Image: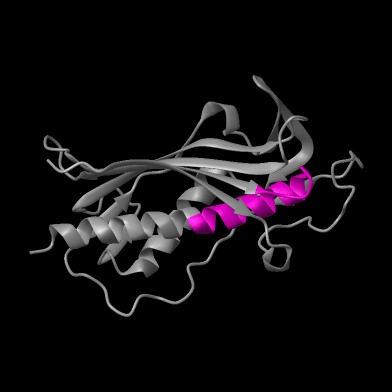
Amino acid sequence: MSIKVIYRSISLILALSLLTGCFGLGSKDDNKDDGRSHFYVIDVDRGSMANSFVKDRVLRIQPIRISPHFRGQTLVFKIGDNEFQAQANHQFFSDPQDMFTEQLKRWLQKSGLFSQVIIDENIPADMVLETAVTALYGDKRDEFSPQSVLEMQFFLTTSGENTNQTLFQTGLRIDINIDETTPSNVVKGWKQGLEELLATVEDDFRDYFSKRSP
């Protein structure tokens, strides 16, 4: 059994000229409750498709698990060491579990590391990827700089009813510095952070598979 365990923390500074990928952007007063509902999406793009794809390596992605604290569609800010606050009228456009699962699937489909990336449990697969989002909040504590925080863990196993074997696991936490902890800024930070996180995970998978090749 070959297990790779990594836990890393990555800090990013939000580049305002690159911010895209969510609805309801642009109001410097969007923290105020204007009575309207604001909806957001996190939509990342790997860019071009890989030039070549491996053969006979089918990956099945399990629906991403979201920590109970952040499972709802309403955005959450951290306002104290053990205190969180839901942001009324500021929500994800869709269920965060579905949104993150789709982003992960689309990214890995383009990576070339797998011949096929599927979600359907009825289709045979060589490997299974289980993923958890363990932190998803905007940091609004007075004693800390404004940040978007995203933490995810990945577990790659063999596929089989009786022989599931851990092949690879890694955890990543990304703290993105933003100008102010407002809903739109936090979502923009998550978008940039997710792009960096998925690029890092792809590199980790590539390194892992290259070491397994004869």
Q: Is 56 located above or below residue 52 in the figure?
A: above
Q: Which residue is drawn at 64% across and 37% down?
A: 137
Q: Where is residue 36 in the image (x, y as percent from the top left)?
A: 87, 44
* Residue segment shown in magenta: 177-196
- Residue 42 shows in this picture: no
Q: Where is residue 118 in the image (x, y as percent from the top left)?
A: 33, 57
Q: Which residue is drawn at 18% across and 45% down?
A: 158
**In the displayed image of the protein, which residue is found farthest to the top?**
82
Q: Is 212 located above or below residue 52 in the figure?
A: above
**Quarter where residue 79 is shown:** top right
Q: Does the magenta stretch include residue 191?
A: yes
Coloring applied to the structure: one colour
Q: Nearer the viewer, residue 58 or 204?
A: 204
Q: Which of 33 and 137 is in front in this view?
A: 137
Q: Is 18 located above or below residue 205 in the figure?
A: below
Q: Which residue is drawn at 38% across and 54% down?
A: 201
Q: Which residue is drawn at 61% across and 50% down?
A: 190
In the rendered image, the quadrant that contains the N terminus is: top left
Q: Is residue 33 left or right of residue 201?
A: right
Q: Does the magenta stretch include residue 59?
A: no
In the rendered image, the quadrant that contains the C terminus is: bottom left
